[in-house]
Image (tube, helix red, strand yellow):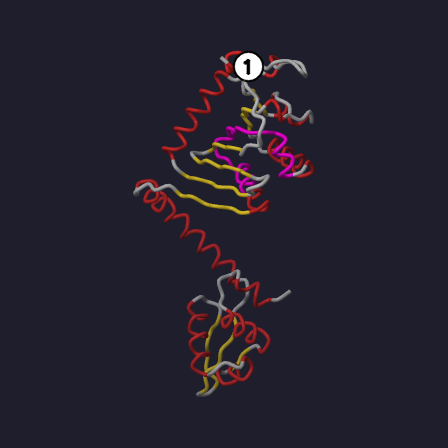
Amino acid sequence: MNLIEELSNLDLTGRQARVYLALLQLGSASAIELAKNTGFKHPTVYDVLDSLKARGLVSESFLGKKKRFTAENPDNFLELEARRQRTLGSILPGLRELYLGGVQRPRIRFYQGAEGIKAVNEELLNVKAKEYFYFGSVQEMFKTNGERYLRDYFKRRIERGIWSNAIRNPSRERDEDYMQPGEHNLRRVRYLPTPISEDVAGLYLYDEKIAIHSALKENYAITIESRELFVLLKTIWQCLWNVAVEPGALPKPGGDFPGKERAET
């Protein structure tokens, strides 16, 4: 294990980590000894020691007229973390108030490639409302993510009690059991009255956010945080849901889909 890299996760710079580790090994040392051990110049060593003392990780004492430095117990990192958590807990409400009360601007994130698309999928597993609303195609979903990932994703969604509400393209269905509607799958499904013959992007609505997947050829995902756009698209989604076809009303293979006559007139 590279301790210098690991200490960087505790907010120590590379120089701070090297000086602290040197003191742990030496027990105590003068600035001159630390400079020789680390290869840093004397002024650099003193600056680093001052910063480590401020964090309670190094103490100083005198041996005669010479100043010596000693590394404090590494358990002090636990106290530093506890102090940081207390500080965060005290200021977070105020920061949230500023965030929510400030000028609202849409936040747009762009993801390229399959890994970016999966990263957006994973975000759905943290939905605060415990449900999301989806429009798209099951076959495209399988082509993009693969069955192994989707089975694992389904299990994790069920464990977290998240409902999937989907308006799906009836011409792009699959018959896997975990893709079927029902309370046991925490899944509500309706179908477009008229099937779409082409590949389409997927649209997800959740927690006042919008996610769009266009994976087969264009291979990207976008997330948009915008309450106004969310309300508009959720309204459109609900209108589609109201006229969508219940699973039991789907035609048999080769038959016409409900609403086809209306769509052709």
Q: Position of residue 52 (x, y in %)?
A: 46, 70
Nearer the observer, 6 or 172: 172
- 110 part of magenta stretch: no
Nearer the observer, 210 or 93: 210
Which quadrant of the figure has residue 48?
bottom left
- The residue located at (48%, 81%) in the rendering is 68
Q: Position of residue 76 (x, y in %)?
A: 51, 63
Q: Quadrant of the N terminus?
A: bottom right
Decide: is 192 above or below 122: above
- For this orientation, the residue located farthest to the bottom is 65
Nearer the observer, 99 or 217: 217
What stretch of residues is rendered in magenta? 120-145
Left-right relation of 45 to 219: left
SS of the residue at dot 1? helix
Decide: is 157 above or below 70: above
Which quadrant of the figure has residue 239?
top left
- The residue located at (60%, 17%) in the rendering is 247
Q: Position of residue 85 (x, y in %)?
A: 45, 52
Residue type at mark 1: give it.
Lys
- The residue located at (54%, 17%) in the rendering is 193
At label 1, counting other C-alpha atoms closer than 10 Å, the crowd grade (few under 14, some 14-19, many 20 or more) is few
The residue pinned by badge 1 equals: 260
